[in-house]
Amino acid sequence: MGPAAHSVVDSVSRVRLHLNAGLAVDAVIRSASWWGYGLAVVVIVLKAGGWHHRFSPAYLLATVAGVGVVAFADVWRNRYGRDDAAAWLDARARCGGAVMACEAGMGARVRLPQNLSTHLPRFTAGPAGRALGLPLLLLIGAYLVPGAAAGISFSPKVVRDRATEIREHLEEARAMEVLDQQRLDSLDEDASEIARQAEERPETAMEGLDSIQASLDRQVLDAARTRLERMAEAAKWEEKATDGRGMTPEEVRSALRSAAAAATGSQAGNEALKKALKEAMGQLGAGSRQELANMSASQLKGLDPATAGAIARALRNGRASQLRRMGRCSGKVCSPGAQTRLSEALSKLPRLSQSGRPGAMGGRLGTATGSRFGVGRKPGRGGISRGRGDAPMAYGNETDRAGMRFRDGEITSRAEVMPGSTIAVRSVAADELPPEEFRPPARTGAAVDGPVRVEAGTGSLAPRREEAASRYFESVSGQARGTAD
Amino acid sequence: VNDAHAAEAHATEEEVQALSSRLHQVETGLNGVILGKPELVRLFITGILARGHILLEGLPGLGKTQMVRAFSALCDLAAARIQFTPDLMPLDITGSYLLRERDGERDFEFRPGPVFANLVLADEINRASPKTQSALLEAMQERRVTVLGQTHALPEPFVVMATQNPIDLEGTYPLPEAQLDRFLFKLTVLDVEADVLTEVITARGSGELPELEPVLTHADLLEAMRLVGRVLLAKQVAGYIARLVRATHGGEEGGHARMVRYGASPRAGLSMAMAARARAFLEGRATVGFEDVKAVAAPVLRHRIILDYAARLEGVTTDDVIEGILSSTSELGRTEPESVVARLEG
């Protein structure tokens, strides 16, 4: 083989390399395209079936690996040999068979074209854009489509059972003595009314019951937190006022006597003060009640009407400040029994949260974890409003079963709606942390075990759900502020 | 050793060019006689170099006979012309035995017919009876004739140029497909342009063939034919020929090849390979390229493809089918990578 043939060998090698590289690019594009279509279909099917999962880098790695394996197999099966490359070069350069003759070892018998080694194919990105555009868009769209919820069907019996369960929860909350009894009565009445109308619209009734359960959870938690704050505040004041030793009854009596000696009172003022003190009796311990009884009977007779009225208004209007003042005097806020019951209730909260039965509402929805108070509850979308008197209950914004395509994200009464349809959740135990130490988790959903247990999780909400959740938590925060005030 | 033998079996470029340059003189001489048809002339010479018989189809008066005579004069070959008529008998072509008396003894003497020539022009072959046609076609295939049990070899080279008139077909005997397959080429002689006709009228007042001197000897032509058989045909090119032939048996959906009732035979592949070798030889190359195959594909396949009635109704010709096959059949038998621009740099 002469020198000319040697250059042809080089040219054939380079052409072969380019052709095989082009083949590899084609195979990758083709494989990625089919993988894109396939993954999009799989994602759509899974989402239609209720699959709900965030994109993970592992998926990307698996896809890249799959594309690579398929592309490699394709290239290996269809790779260009030297004969193919020689024929390609011969045909494209119009060499009249000379290149193929050189490749066949007969280069000395033919004449080769000049500058043959410069004839190389070029690459273009056009096919990639055409082939990958549509599957890529389809895949992105498939990931963005919200997942569908599984078909939900409730029988009236299930609704009634759920109503019975919620009424039991209301009774438990009533026994804790931490909620307004009238509010509990109203919720109980609503639950009973919903149970009576379960035959007509079971899905909406179930959502209404969920709303009641969520409202109950929220109020219990808020009340418990308020009590805890008061106890902590009282303990702080007691320690500050008495240097840690507490005030004795004699010191309380002396302080009140000093106030009484400073004024001349009237009977009307004394009566008003007596009434206010009587109302405050339920908030005090036995020792403090005795002291106040003694004061109202003997020491406070001399108070002038203005002073007695001011003390009475203070006792009526500012329950928290009143309790602080009383705590400064007596060192106690709640009766030992009430304090014990409250502590027991608070200790039950985490346990109750974990003991939710999946067979209830949460189990039927597939994702929600049933709980009485705390995390994992699903407030639902539909709402109910009471009519006047015995008027039938009006339902609004009901759920259409045919339209139940989107899966609800889990929200809790202690959740904070964050931008980007993400909610951060903190459990009751996390309330023991100062606000500045509470760190919402970053979109991963995690349970952190530490000195103080913090449960946290995130979830995505469909746009319509997001709006409902926002309204819900706005009302929660508003009520919580009202309770704290 | 086998590679060495194979290499020796192939012609070198110097050997090829030594004779192809002289064939170019023949081609130039023919172009001087047949004006305005250089491609037809080249295919005509290509067919003769490939030892193939040629079927010329065209209207009368387009120079078919002149071309045969001119070539025979330029190559110093014996030429004969047979006008086929319905009453033409086989012995009129092959020759017959005549009873002769010599020195008082009578014996039969073979009188060769017009087929015993290097170039035989069978004019209007479709006007003879099938029996007579078969006699000529047997001679074309066997390159010998048998009369009264005696076999007589035909001279080398032996090439038949048969003409067909595409009009006035009443009372004719169209050649069957099996006999058409014996022709290497079917060349269509088209009408001439006005300017060419003007030149013909000006230069050929009486229509007489100009005086031509032989530029190639009989032996040189035989040597050229022998060298054509030694032109290298790479297996990729052979594969391309095979794919072209196979494509005539039914093509892709939507292509004209779907209108083919009968495709080309393996003999068509052999003929195409030999014709491509001859064309490469005429180009002065010792190797066959893909473009050689493309150049001879139409005349080789034109009379070997039988179209169905749908083609007739739609006005699709065999040339349309062949053009579609050539455009849809890749030289490599595979599509190129899409991400590689086929256009070459440099």
Image (cartoon, coloured by chain):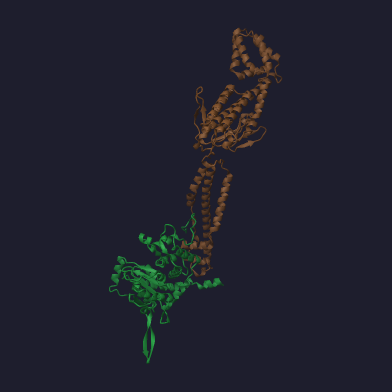
Q: Residue at x 43, y 72 (%)?
A: B50
Q: Quadrant of residue B104?
A: bottom left
Q: Can residue A113 be seen?
A: no
Q: Quadrant of residue A246?
A: top right
Q: Looking at the image, how many numbered discs can be counted on the residues?
A: 0
**Is residue B286 or residue A407 the one in the foreground?**
A407
Q: Quadrant of residue A413?
A: top right
**Is residue A417 or residue A277 the one in the foreground?**
A277
Which x, y percent locates residue A53? 57, 41
Q: Is residue B129 left or right of B237 when viewed as pictured? A: left
The chain that appears green in the image is B
Which x, y percent locates residue A465? 52, 34
Q: Can residue B88 be seen?
A: yes
> What residue occupies the far bottom of the structure in this picture?
B104
Q: Quadrant of the N terminus of chain A?
A: bottom right
- What is the display colour for chain A? brown
Judge whether A264 appears above or below A177 on screen. above
Q: Is residue A293 left or right of B318 when viewed as pictured? A: right
Judge whether A306 appears above or below A10 on screen. above
Which x, y percent locates residue B338? 48, 55
